[in-house]
Image (cartoon, grey):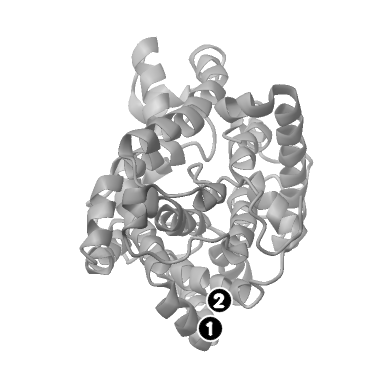
Amino acid sequence: MDDKTNSTQVNTCAPGGDSLQEAHEPATSQENAQPKKSTGFLNSINHFRGIAIIFIVMAHCYRPAGWQIETFADKAWFNLMMNGTVFFVFISGFLFHHVFYHRWDYKKYMKSKTKFVFLPYLLLSLPWIVWHLTVGTDPMMHKELADITAPAQAASWYVITGRTLTAYWYIPMGMMLFALSPWVMYLIKKQQVLYYAIPLLLIAIMVHRPISNLNAIQSLVYFLPVYLLGVWGSAHRDKLFPFIDKYWIPMFLAGVALALIQAEFFGAGVLNKAPFEMTVPDLMLPQKILLTLVILAILNKFEHVSIAPLQKLAEVSFAIYFIHPWITTPWWMIYDSPDLFGLAGKGNVFTTLIVTLVVVAISYAIAILIKKMLSKRSRYLIGW
């Protein structure tokens, strides 16, 4: 990959398949008539996507790495590590405004998402749906979690929930998020994004993420304010970036403090629950939003630098997202245990990082191989 700072040749798909490359395409005459900010390539956002995919994979590697979350330190590290999806969603919202706001075509947008997000999801889910319906774990997930026995109904349930593989729950929620884009466009034009993002964030903190990530609507309620904050961040980055550059240290300390408070009083990890069950507030969501801004502030200091490893990870990030569950999920679904290497009780955050990097590297290599074999058609299979 070219290491030039403002390269216009990098075809990089954001979470949901948004491409920074599209930011360089000429606008129509009607769009040119609208006042707009520069939509040039942003190294900081691209680097952030490379970091985000590491967090996504890491959340699925701690059990194979033998990390048993027991001590206070374990819980604190775990809270800082988990829910990296917030990074993904914020970036997706940021790029929605940065790339698509100035050349909006809803029909074309949804057609692209269907071909390069939903279709790969279906194709990669299909073998596992067949596996779940035939020789899957006992009791089979669709019977245990939804009390479904009819094969057609069970297959539909797997598609709707994304429960075929770890991490695939994001796609049903993501498709609904994409479908809401006309409303998001309306909020941008009316300059009301933040007016909705803040109240929705307060609701999300009380709603939490759904049990087993099965409820796509609840996931949408949880992540929608993060998406809107990303949209607002792009639309007002002339205000956002100076602010976070000035206050990133206090925000970092506040984020760490929230992780410590959760570890002490509420436990470790995402506190999934039913949507209307009243419980403690979700501290992880504001924590991750603060860390999002901290990472963005630090990366923005190096906007003029192109970091090759992160650029490459960013380029293949969505393919890595699709591929890595094929590596991590069989550890517990087929072998009936995440402890494939006999590391239970011997792991920690560092072994988790090592396993994560190995899984990322393998996923990256598979993505490159598929890309070479299928060329442009690989987008229909792995989104890249």
In the depicted structure, whether residue 186 falls above or below residue 241:
above
State the SS at label 1.
helix
Q: Which mark is residue 297?
A: 2
Question: What number of labels is visible?
Answer: 2
Q: Residues within 10 Å of mark 1 (few under 14, many from 20)?
A: some
State the SS at label 2.
helix
Q: In the image as oriented, which residue stretches furthest toward the front?
A: 29
Q: In front here: 348 or 258?
A: 258
Left or right: where does residue 288 sit relative to residue 327? left
Quadrant of the rendered image containing residue 48: bottom right
Residue at image coords 34%, 19%: 148
Upstream in the sequence, badge 1 or badge 2?
Answer: 1
Q: Which mark is residue 295?
A: none
Q: In front here: 210 or 95?
A: 95
Residue occupied by mark 1: 245
Left or right: where does residue 81 sit relative to residue 207? right
In the depicted structure, whether residue 55 falls above or below residue 177:
below
Q: Quadrant of the C terminus?
A: top right
Left or right: where does residue 14 sit relative to residue 181? right
In the depicted structure, whether residue 308 falls above or below residue 302:
above
Q: Residues within 10 Å of mark 2 (few under 14, many from 20)?
A: many
Q: Position of residue 229 (x, y in %)?
A: 37, 64
What kind of residue is marked 1? Asp
Quadrant of the rendered image containing residue 201: bottom left
Residue at image coords 59%, 74%: 300
Residue at image coords 70%, 57%: 310
Separation of disc 1 and disc 2 at Cα? 5 Å
Q: Position of residue 289 (x, y in %)?
A: 44, 68
- Residue 209 shows up from this direction: no
- Residue 187 shows up from this direction: yes
Q: In front here: 370 or 61?
A: 370
What kind of residue is marked 2? Ala
